[in-house]
Image (cartoon, coloured by chain):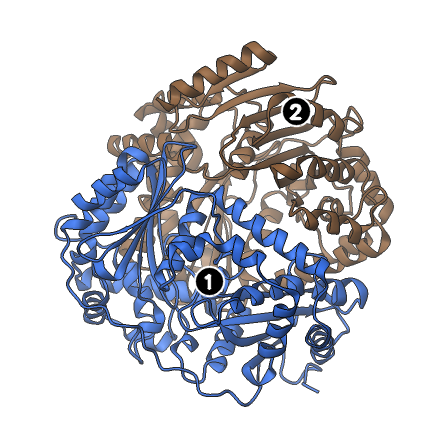
Chain colours: A brown, B blue
C-alpha cells in the first residue's frame, strides 16, 4: 500500500514539474526520488519527505585530495576545514554564531576524489541555512587566523597518527600500493606539506575545484521541488561553470605478495591487507560485491568472521571491503589481533582468501548473500542524511535514479559460475599486507 | 562490523536525555512485568526492535568486572529452541542489522528489519530472555574475542587507559569506577558458570524494556508482544538497585598517564554531579545547558576563549551525561598548542569556569543553547535507532516516557540563574579528578 501511495505521488510530480520520479520499487523503501533541475541547469536529486520538519543536504565536488598540487598534500583537507570558518562579510565567529543561533549543522571534508559537504536544518530555518551555504561555497574567507587554527589542528592529528597502529598500517598500505601516484599521498598530507600550504594555495584550490559541472547534490526532507529549484540557483549559481582538474592516470595497486612489518610497542597487532578490486562500472562489479560479502563483507555470516573470530577468537573485528575510486579499484581489509598469534591470524586470512579464490562460494552462500544484500540496502538508509549521502554517491558513480529499480535484478542476475569466476579474478593476484605492532609467529621469508 | 558495540557511559552524554515530544508514543506493561514502548514512524516499511535489560557493569559482583559485557557477547550463542547462530543467520537472511551494547546501568540488543519480520524478531528475542544454552566450547573462544576487544578499545589506546584511571579515581566507593569492559585480569578469569549465574539473576521479563520504533501501530505491537514476550514467565525478582554510594568527597584528585606514544598531550577533568535520577528538579537540565554554553560549538566559552581568543589550545570543550541511575559526570577537556604546558592550559580553563561561577551566563547564551538542545531532539527523530535509544536508556534507568517527552519543556524552563547555581554548586574541585595524558612523567608536563 505504501508503494502505491508513493507511486501516485510520483506521477503527480512528473506531470507538474517535468522531473523524473522513481520509486525504490526493488527495495523495502517506498521513497520517491525526483531529479530536479534549476532554471540555470543545476541538478539535484530530491526525496520530498514531510514527516519530520527538517532538511538534509549532501553534496560533493569531484576533485578531492587527488587534486592537491604537487608537494602540497593536504591542501584539500585544509581548504575543506575552512569553508565554514568565515565567508562573505562574516568572520569565523560571526559565521558560526549565525549557524548556532538557528541550530544549523554544516560541515565539509575532503576525500581522495571529492570535497564533500553536508548541512542539516529545521525546515523553519531553511532560507538561512541555504544562505550560509551559499556564502561558504562561493565566498570563503581563509582569514590568516582561522587558517593557522585549522593548520595547527591538522598538524596535531598528523603527530598523533605517527604512533597510532591503525593509521600507520593504513598509511603504509596506500603509500606502497600507489607509490608515485597521487593516491599514494596521505589525504591529510604530512607535517612538511601541511606546513607549506599558503593562503594563496587554498584560494587557488577552491577556485579550481568548487564549480558547477563537477557538483552532485542530494536533498532529503521537508522541501518541495519548486522551492528547491530556486534555492539551487541562489546557492550554487555564482560558482564558475567548469572546474580546472589536473589529469589523473588510472592505476592498479602494487606490492602484491609483500608483507611489510612495522615495529611499534603496542599489545595488539594491527593488520591491513588488500589488492586489486573491481571498478564500479565493470560488468563484474555486482558479482564481486556478492563475493566480497561472503568472504568478509562485514556481516557475522562471513567466512573470515567465522574462521578468525567465531572459531578461534583471534580478533574482535575482521572484514574487507571493495573500495572504488575514480582512477583505481581496490579490495581492502583489516583486523587487529593478539601479538602472540599475529602470524597465525595473517596466515589464516591469506589461506582463506586463497582457498576462496580457487573454489568460490557455495550455491547456498550465494543465495543467502543475494537475499541479504537485496534487503539490507534499504535498511541501511535509516536517516535523511544517509539517504542523501547515498544519492550523491550514485550520481558520482554515474548512475541514474533508475538504479533503484535495476539493482535487484542486477543482484539476481549473478550466477554461481559468475561468482566463482569473479572470486578468482578478484582474489588470486596476491595481497599487500601491512602489519604494525610486535607480532610473533611470522615465517621470516615472507617478511619485507 | 561493529557488532557487540560497547557503549561507554560518557558517549551517551550529549544527546542521551533528549527525545522529541512530537512523536506519538505508546507505553504498556505485560502481565509478566515486561515494559513495552512503541514509537510509530511510517516513513519506510522498516522497524527497529530493541530490548533493554536493567542490568549493567555497575551490577556486577566485585571481582567479576566485565561480566555484564561478556554475557552480552554470549547472548549470541544460541538457545535450546534456536541453537547456535540461528538468530543471527535469520537476521542476516532478511537483510537486517543487529547489534548489542553494554553500559554501567543497562545492556541492550537490537535488530533493524523489514516490518513484516517484527514478530519473528520478537519471538527470537523472547526465547533468549530465558533460553540461553552455553558450552565451554563456545564460551572460551568468545572470551578471547572480548580480550581482543579490550586490547583494541583500551590497551592499544593511551587516552582510553587514562579514561579508566580517571573513573577509578572519581568513584571512591561506587561501582561506576569499574570499566564496563572490565579490568583485564578479571576478564581473563570469567567463565561459563559466572555468565549463567548472572544471566539467571538479571535476565527476566520483569527486568526488561522493549522499544519498537518504525512502521507499526501500538495495537499490532501489543498483540505481537503478548504472543511472544507474554509467554515468558518472570523467573527472578527484581530488587531496587542499591549500589555502594559515594562518601563526601573532600580532596581533588589528579592522575597522569604517561605513554611514549602520546604525541599530543591533553587534559580532562571530570566532576561528580547528579544524574537525571538523582538531581533535584531542574538541576540536570541546568547542567545540560551549562555544558552546552561552556563546551559545545565554536562559540562556546571554552573553545572561543582557549582556541580563538587566547590561542592556548587546539581544542577544548565540555560534556554532561545525565542518563544514569546514581551519578553523572560533568567533563571539561582541552588539548594544548605546542609550547603550552598542561598546567598553563588548566589554569586558563579554571579561569573560564571561574567566570561562569562568579558572573553566570548571558541571556543570549542561554537562548542559543536552548535552541540547539531542543533542535537536537528533532534531529534525533530522523533516526529510528537514536529515538529508540533515548526511550530505552531513559526507561532502563527508571525514568518515564512522560519525562522523556517533556524534554523540550524541561529545557525551556532553565533560567540563567539556575545555570549559575549549578556551576557554583557542582564545579567544585573537591568532587573532581583531573587527568593528564603525557609522553613521559619526566617531561615539562609536571603539575604546578
Q: Position of residue A331 (x, y in %)?
A: 48, 40
Q: Residue at image x 28%, y 30%? A: A367
Taking A429 as reference, is B58 above or below it? Answer: below
The answer to whether one can see residue A448 in this image is no
Of A386 and B257, nearer the camera is: A386
Instruction: Give the quadrant of residue A139.
Output: top right
Point out the image quarter for the C terminus of chain B.
Answer: bottom right
Q: Which disc is residue A227 wearing?
A: 2
Q: Position of residue A371 (x, y in %)?
A: 31, 31
Looking at the image, residue A77 sits to the left or right of residue A197; the answer is left
Q: Position of residue A213 (x, y in %)?
A: 72, 24
Of A58 and A114, nearer the camera is: A58
- Of labels 1 and 2, earlier in sequence is 2
The answer to whether one can see residue B415 in this image is yes
Looking at the image, residue A114 sits to the left or right of residue A246; the answer is left
Give the residue at mark 1: A269
Of B242 and A295, nearer the camera is: B242
Question: Is the residue marked by circle 2 packed among few (<14), some (14-19), or many (20+) residues within 10 Å?
Answer: few
Amino acid at each position: 500500500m505504501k508503494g502505491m501511495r508513493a507511486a501516485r505521488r510520483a506521477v503527480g510530480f512528473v506531470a507538474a514539474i517535468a522531473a523524473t520520479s522513481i520509486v525504490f520499487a526493488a527495495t523495502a523503501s517506498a521513497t520517491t526520488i525526483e531529479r530536479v533541475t534549476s532554471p540555470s541547469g543545476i541538478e539535484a536529486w530530491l526525496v520530498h519527505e514531510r514527516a519530520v520538519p527538517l532538511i538534509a543536504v549532501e553534496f560533493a565536488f569531484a576533485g578531492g585530495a587527488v587534486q592537491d598540487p604537487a608537494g602540497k598534500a593536504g591542501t584539500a583537507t585544509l581548504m575543506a576545514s575552512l569553508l565554514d570558518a568565515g565567508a562573505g562579510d562574516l568572520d569565523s565567529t560571526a559565521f558560526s554564531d549565525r549557524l548556532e543561533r538557528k541550530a544549523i549543522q554544516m560541515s565539509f571534508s575532503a576525500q581522495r576524489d571529492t570535497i564533500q559537504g553536508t548541512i542539516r536544518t529545521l525546515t523553519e530555518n531553511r532560507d538561512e541555512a541555504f544562505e550560509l551555504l551559499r556564502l561558504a561555497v562561493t565566498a570563503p574567507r581563509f582569514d590568516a587566523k582561522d587558517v593557522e587554527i585549522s593548520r595547527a589542528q591538522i598538524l596535531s592529528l598528523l603527530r598523533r597518527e605517527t604512533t597510532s597502529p591503525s593509521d600507520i598500517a593504513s598509511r603504509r598500505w596506500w603509500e606502497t600500493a600507489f607509490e608515485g601516484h597521487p593516491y599514494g599521498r596521505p589525504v591529510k598530507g604530512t607535517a612538511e606539506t601541511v606546513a607549506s600550504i599558503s593562503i594563496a594555495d587554498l584560494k587557488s584550490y577552491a577556485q579550481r575545484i568548487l564549480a558547477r559541472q563537477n557538483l552532485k547534490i542530494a536533498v532529503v526532507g521537508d522541501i518541495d521541488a519548486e522551492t528547491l529549484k530556486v534555492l539551487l540557483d541562489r546557492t550554487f549559481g555564482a560558482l564558475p561553470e567548469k572546474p580546472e582538474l589536473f589529469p589523473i592516470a588510472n592505476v592498479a595497486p602494487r606490492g602484491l605478495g609483500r608483507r611489510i612489518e612495522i615495529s611499534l610497542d603496542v599489545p595488539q597487532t594491527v593488520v591491513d591487507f588488500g589488492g586489486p578490486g573491481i571498478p564500479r562500472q565493470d560488468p563484474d562489479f555486482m558479482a564481486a560485491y556478492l563475493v566480497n560479502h561472503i568472504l568478509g563483507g562485514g556481516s557475522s555470516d562471513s567466512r573470515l568472521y567465522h574462521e578468525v573470530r567465531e572459531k578461534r577468537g583471534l580478533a574482535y573485528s575482521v572484514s574487507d571491503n571493495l573500495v572504488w575510486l575514480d582512477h583505481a579499484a581496490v579490495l581492502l581489509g583489516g583486523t587487529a589481533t593478539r601479538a602472540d598469534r599475529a602470524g597465525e591470524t595473517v596466515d589464516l586470512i591469506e589461506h582463506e582468501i586463497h582457498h576462496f579464490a580457487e573454489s568460490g562460494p557455495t550455491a547456498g552462500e550465494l543465495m543467502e548473500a543475494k537475499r541479504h544484500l537485496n534487503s539490507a540496502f534499504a535498511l541501511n538508509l535509516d536517516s535523511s542524511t544517509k539517504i542523501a549521502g547515498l544519492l550523491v554517491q550514485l550520481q558520482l558513480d554515474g548512475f541514474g535514479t533508475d538504479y533503484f529499480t535495476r539493482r535487484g535484478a542486477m543482484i539476481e542476475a549473478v550466477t554461481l559460475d559468475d561468482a566463482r569466476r569473479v572470486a578468482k579474478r578478484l582474489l588470486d593476484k596476491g595481497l599487500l599486507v601491512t602489519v604494525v605492532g610486535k607480532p610473533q609467529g611470522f615465517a621470516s621469508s615472507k617478511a619485507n | 562490523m561493529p557488532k557487540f558495540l560497547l557503549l561507554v557511559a560518557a558517549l551517551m552524554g550529549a544527546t542521551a536525555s533528549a527525545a522529541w515530544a512530537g512523536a506519538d508514543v505508546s507505553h504498556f506493561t505485560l502481565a509478566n512485568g515486561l515494559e513495552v514502548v512503541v514509537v510509530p514512524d511510517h516513513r519506510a516499511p522498516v522497524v527497529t526492535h530493541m530490548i533493554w535489560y536493567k542490568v549493567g557493569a555497575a551490577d556486577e559482583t566485585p571481582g567479576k568486572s566485565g561480566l555484564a559485557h561478556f554475557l552480552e557477547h554470549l547472548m549470541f550463542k544460541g538457545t535450546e529452541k534456536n541453537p547456535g547462530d540461528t538468530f543471527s543467520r535469520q537476521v542476516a537472511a532478511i537483510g537486517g542489522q543487529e547489534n548489542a551494547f553494554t553500559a554501567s546501568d543497562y545492556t541492550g540488543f537490537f535488530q533493524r528489519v523489514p516490518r513484516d519480520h517484527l514478530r519473528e524478531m520478537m519471538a527470537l528475542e523472547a526465547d533468549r530472555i530465558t533460553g540461553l544454552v552455553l558450552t565451554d566450547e563456545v564460551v572460551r573462544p568468545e572470551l578471547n574475542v572480548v580480550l581482543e576487544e579490550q586490547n583494541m578499545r583500551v590497551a592499544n589506546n593511551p587516552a582510553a587507559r587514562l579514561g579508566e584511571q580517571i573513573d577509578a579515581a572519581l568513584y571512591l566507593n561506587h561501582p561506576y569506577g569499574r570499566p564496563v569492559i572490565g579490568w583485564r585480569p578479571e576478564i581473563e578469569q570469567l567463565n561459563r558458570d559466572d555468565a549463567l549465574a548472572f544471566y539467571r539473576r538479571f535476565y527476566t521479563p520483569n527486568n526488561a524494556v522493549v522499544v519498537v520504533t518504525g512502521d507499526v501501530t501500538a495495537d499490532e505491537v501489543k498483540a505481537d508482544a503478548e504472543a511472544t514476550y507474554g509467554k515468558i514467565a518472570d523467573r527472578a525478582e527484581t530488587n531496587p538497585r542499591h549500589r555502594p554510594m559515594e562518601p563526601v568527597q573532600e580532596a581533588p584528585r589528579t592522575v597522569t598517564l604517561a605513554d611514549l606514544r602520546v604525541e599530543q598531550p591533553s587534559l580532562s577533568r571530570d566532576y561528580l554531579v547528579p544524574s537525571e535520577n538523582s538531581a533535584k528538579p531542574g538541576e540536570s537540565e541546568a547542567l545540560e545547558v551549562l555544558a552546552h554554553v561552556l563546551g559545545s560549538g565554536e562559540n562556546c566559552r571554552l573553545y572561543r576563549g582557549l582556541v580563538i581568543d587566547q590561542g592556548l589550545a587546539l581544542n577544548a570543550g565540555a560534556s554532561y551525561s545525565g542518563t544514569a541511575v546514581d551519578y553523572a559526570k560533568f567533563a571539561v577537556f582541552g588539548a594544548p598548542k605546542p609550547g603550552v604546558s598542561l598546567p598553563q592550559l588548566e589554569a586558563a580553563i579554571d579561569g573560564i569556569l571561574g567566570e561562569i561561577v562568579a558572573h553566570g551566563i548571558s541571556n543570549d547564551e542561554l537562548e542559543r543553547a536552548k535552541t540547539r538542545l531542543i533542535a537536537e531532539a528533532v534531529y534525533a527523530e530522523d533516526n529510528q535507532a537514536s529515538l529508540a535509544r533515548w526511550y530505552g536508556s531513559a526507561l532502563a534507568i527508571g525514568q518515564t516516557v512522560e519525562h522523556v517527552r517533556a524534554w523540550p519543556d524541561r529545557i525551556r524552563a532553565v533560567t540563567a540563574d539556575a545555570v549559575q547555581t549549578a556551576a557554583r554548586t557542582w564545579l567544585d574541585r573537591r568532587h573532581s579528578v583531573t587527568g593528564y595524558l603525557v609522553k613521559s612523567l619526566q617531561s615539562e608536563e609536571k603539575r604546578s
